[in-house]
Amino acid sequence: MNPVIVISVISGLIVLLLVTGTPIKPLRFVGQVAMKVMIGALFLFFLNAFGSQYGIHVPINLATSSISGILGIPGVVGLTVIQLWIV
């Protein structure tokens, strides 16, 4: 799949979640978590795209996307360290 399409779809979903928002708190919480997981997947996508030159590859799945989305850049760094030195 073309990386431009992947980035466009993820960006579109993030904008959709930001614009629509819900008045019901549980649904809003689920939307915020889903948005963070998508942002985490986007972080990992960029890490894999730029890190391939240095032999860095962190798989993109629900667990790694959640970690990187909730923890942000420190989570991505932590996943990279785990991938390089432990696995």
Image (cartoon, rainbow, N blue to C red):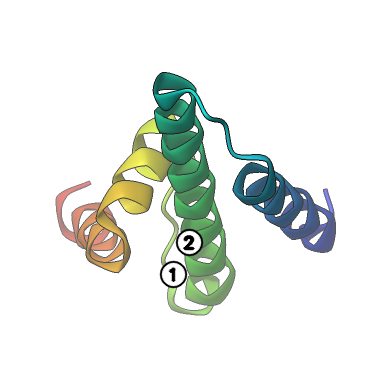
Determine the residue positioned at 27% across, 53% down.
83
Residue 71 versus residue 17 in the image, above or below: below
Task: Look at discs 2 and 1 and give the one toward the viewer.
Answer: 2
Q: Is residue 61 visible?
A: no
Residue type, mark 2 in image: Phe
Determine the residue positioned at 52% across, 63% down.
48
Residue matched to label 2 = 43
Q: Nearer the viewer, residue 65 or 60?
A: 65
Q: Is 45 situated left or right of 76 in this image?
A: right
Residue type, mark 1 in image: Gly
Q: Secondary structure at mark 1?
A: loop
Q: Nearer the viewer, residue 41 or 27?
A: 27
Q: Is 70 situated left or right of 20 in this image?
A: left
User: Where residue 16 appears, x then y in whole percent?
Assistant: 71, 45
Residue 82 versus residue 22 in the image, above or below: below
Determine the residue positioned at 42% across, 43% down.
65
Residue matched to label 1 = 55
Residue 13 versus residue 74 in the image, above or below: above
User: Where residue 46 appears, x then y in whole percent?
Assistant: 55, 67
Mark before the other along the chain sequence, 2 or 1? 2
Q: Is residue 55 visible?
A: yes
